[in-house]
Image: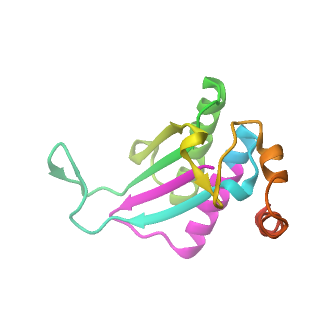
Amino acid sequence: MPTYTVKYSNFKLSPKQKKFIADGITKTHSKFTGANTFFAQVIFQKNENNSHFMGGKLIKNKEIFLNGQIRVGRTPAIKKNLILGLRKVLIQNTKLKKEFVWIYLEDLPPKQMIEYGEILPKSGEEKKWFNSLSISLKKRLKRLEK
């Protein structure tokens, strides 16, 4: 249900850092939203050199940007805890100062999302949705659950 895209400029993330960040994002999302971990998808994209600008000027600092697309329906308190938890994950795993961390959360209506081939349920209706899936897909998702 959530798709988190991590874009970063002017530094490299090791495979180990990517794993820790992906695990941290997944666990943070699950902790604050109650969603199963198998829904969290994390995609890493390194910006090419000389491809990140602010105010029309080339950025030379190390910067990281996290865009999270999540289902609508979460309270402001849940989203605040989620975004602060995500910032903590990025800072801990990159050692960047918080002024170089950007996070945007976008609410999407579940009716406009398909994952695992199925339209997503409203927040809180995950169990009913899961029970409607094929046996083979249920097994696949259980293997992804942490």
| Residue 74 left/right relative to 113 | right
Q: Please say if 117 is above or below 97.
A: below
Q: Please say if 79 is above or below 45.
A: above
Pick whichever, 54 or 72, lies toward us.
72
Q: Where is residue 19 shown, x and y percent of the image? A: 62, 68
Magenta-drawn segment: 1-27
Please tell me whether residue 8 belongs to the stretch shown in magenta. yes
Q: Where is residue 50 shown, x and y percent of the image? A: 21, 64
Pick whichever, 118 or 142, lies toward us.
118
Asked which colour scheme the image uses, the reply is rainbow
Extreme residue toward the bottom, this view: 15
Pick whichever, 28 or 35, lies toward us.
35
Pick whichever, 116 or 36, lies toward us.
116
Residue at 73%, 47% in the rendered image: 30
Q: Where is residue 130 shown, x and y percent of the image? A: 80, 52
Q: Please say if 18 is above or below 59.
A: below
| Residue 27 left/right relative to 108 | right
Q: How many labels does the image show?
A: 0
* Quadrant that contains the C terminus: bottom right
Residue at 71%, 52% in the rendered image: 27
Extreme residue toward the left, this view: 56
Q: Where is residue 44 shown, x and y percent of the image? A: 48, 65
Please tell me whether residue 65 belongs to the stretch shown in magenta. no
Q: Please say if 68 is above or below 62.
A: above
Residue at 55%, 53% in the rendered image: 3
| Residue 107 left/right relative to 37 | left
Residue at 57%, 67% in the rendered image: 17
